[in-house]
Image: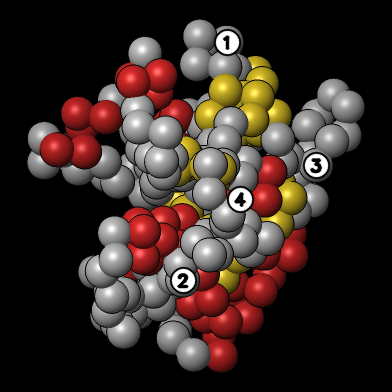
Amino acid sequence: TKLRQARPDARLLLVSDHGFAPFYWSVNLNRWLLDNGYLALATEGEGGGDRVLADLFKGRNLWSAVDWRRTRAYSVGLGLIYLNLMGREPAGVVEPGARAEALEGELAQRLVWVRHPGNGQHAIRSVTLGRLAYRGPCLDDAPDLVVNFSPGFRVSWQSALGGIDEPIVAENKRAWSADHCSVAPEAVPGVVMGNLPLDTARASIMDVAPTILTLQGVPVPNEMEGRSLYRK
């Protein structure tokens, strides 16, 4: 209705920041790290129990079951892996520099071989180094590895909360049957379209703000990332 009421010369821009992919299988990265010797538990067989999102804000010690003296890597968040780095983590054991970079490379190389136990499909399309994926003043807080899952797979709910209590690959039986979180970015691209000439060949979400400013006749600040997609 609103579109039909718009002026004939109205300029329309439709943008989404992501698409969606089916979510049939979940992957618990902490279980993989545990089974492959990168994460250790203080008490064998104790994973800390199921967690809910509210636990992150209650001050609960979510990592009480982890033996940090024997842990080199752990996962929390949407497909993110952190090294237990000296000088960053309170009980860090991984030396920064060459040893940390070697561990990053080892993890990235091995993770892409995680497969569905039934059909052998690769669960992980690629792994990106955090120092290449991010930049800026908060880089020190960025994850060391970003795991990009194949369509049909996603990081498990418990792994996102730092949990361990699932098999590496488990069937998603929840109503939440599609997602973009932790799926390889190229598999869930966003959409940009409009009724005006746009250069969308290499469009990025960072281009949206410069495009809107250009359409409004406002100069784009030099410090703003991205470019205007509008082509007169």
223 vs 23, left or right, is left
Residue 63, x across and y down, in percent: 30, 46
* Quadrant of the image occupied by residue 206: bottom left
Q: CA distance from mark 1 to mark 2?
A: 42 Å
> Which percent across, then down, holds residue 223?
29, 82
Q: Nearer the viewer, residue 12 or 100?
A: 12
The answer to the question of whether label 4 and label 3 lie on touching residues, with beta carbons closer than 8 A, is no
Residue type, numbered disc 2? Arg
Q: CA distance from mark 3 to mark 2?
A: 36 Å
Give the residue type that dot 4 points to.
Pro
Q: Quadrant of residue 150?
A: top right
Question: 53 and 192: which one is in front?
Answer: 192
Q: Residue at x 57, y 56 (%)?
A: 198
Give whichever of discs 4 and 2 has the lower sequence position: 4
Measure the C-alpha gap from mark 1 to mark 4: 24 Å
Q: To which residue does mark 3 refer? A: 122
Decide: marks 4, 2 in contact (CB < 8 A)? Answer: no
What is the crowding at mark 4: few (fewer than 14 residues within 10 Å), some, or many (at least 20)? some
Whichever of callouts 1 and 3 sits on the residue coming sooner in the sequence is 3
Q: Judge depth for marks 1 and 2 and give the one in front.
A: 2
Element under disc 1: loop
Q: Residue furthest front?
A: 8
165 vs 123, nearest the viewer: 123
Q: Residue at x 70, y 29 (%)?
A: 152
Q: Of discs 3 and 2, which sits in the foreground?
A: 2
For badge 3, the amino acid type reads His
- Determine which residue is flagged by label 4: 185
Is the Cβ of the residue at disc 1 closer than 8 Å to that at disc 4? no
Q: Nearer the viewer, mark 4 or mark 3?
A: 4
Q: Which mark is residue 227?
A: 2
Q: Quote the CA–CA distance across marks 1 and 3.
A: 20 Å
How packed mark 1 is, by other alpha carbons closer than 10 Å (few <14, some 14-19, many 20 or more), is few
